[in-house]
Image (cartoon, rainbow, N blue to C red):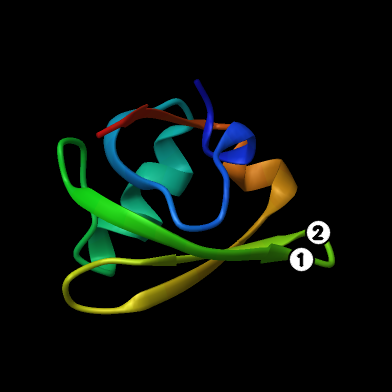
Amino acid sequence: MTLLQAKAGDKFRIKEIKEKKLNMRLLSLGVCNGDSCFMENAANGNILMKTTETKIVLSNNLAQKIEIEVV
């Protein structure tokens, strides 16, 4: 399942980030494979996800490259 398929309010764990460049960008924000996150909102082609440390806004194109497992 990709992040784009998740619903607002879902808690999930990141299984895999398919694109290496995106993986490095998220790692610089403190997000890596295996982290638990919470999806707050999805609107206007963007997804707002909350981690324990920060909130991150991703476009739908980038959200398709993140594999998740809903907890």
Q: Amino acid at mark 1?
A: Ala
Gap between marks 1 and 2 measured at Cα: 6 Å
Q: Residue at left 33%, top 50%?
A: 24
Marks 1 and 2 close (CB-CB < 8 Å) = yes
Residue 67 x %, y %: 43, 26
- Total labels: the figure holds 2
| 57 relative position to 42: left or right | left
Name the residue tied to disc 2: 45
Residue 61 sits above or below residue 71 on the image: below
Residue 55 x %, y %: 39, 77
Q: Secondary structure at mark 2?
A: loop
Tell me which corner region of the image, top left, top right, bottom left or bottom right, holds residue 6: top right
| 59 relative position to 41: left or right | right
Density class for disc 1 (Cα within 10 Å; few <14, some 14-19, many ≥20) is: few
Q: Amino acid at mark 2?
A: Gly
Given residues 24 and 70, the one toward you in this image is: 70
Name the residue tied to disc 1: 43
| 5 relative position to 25: left or right | right
Density class for disc 2 (Cα within 10 Å; few <14, some 14-19, many ≥20) is: few
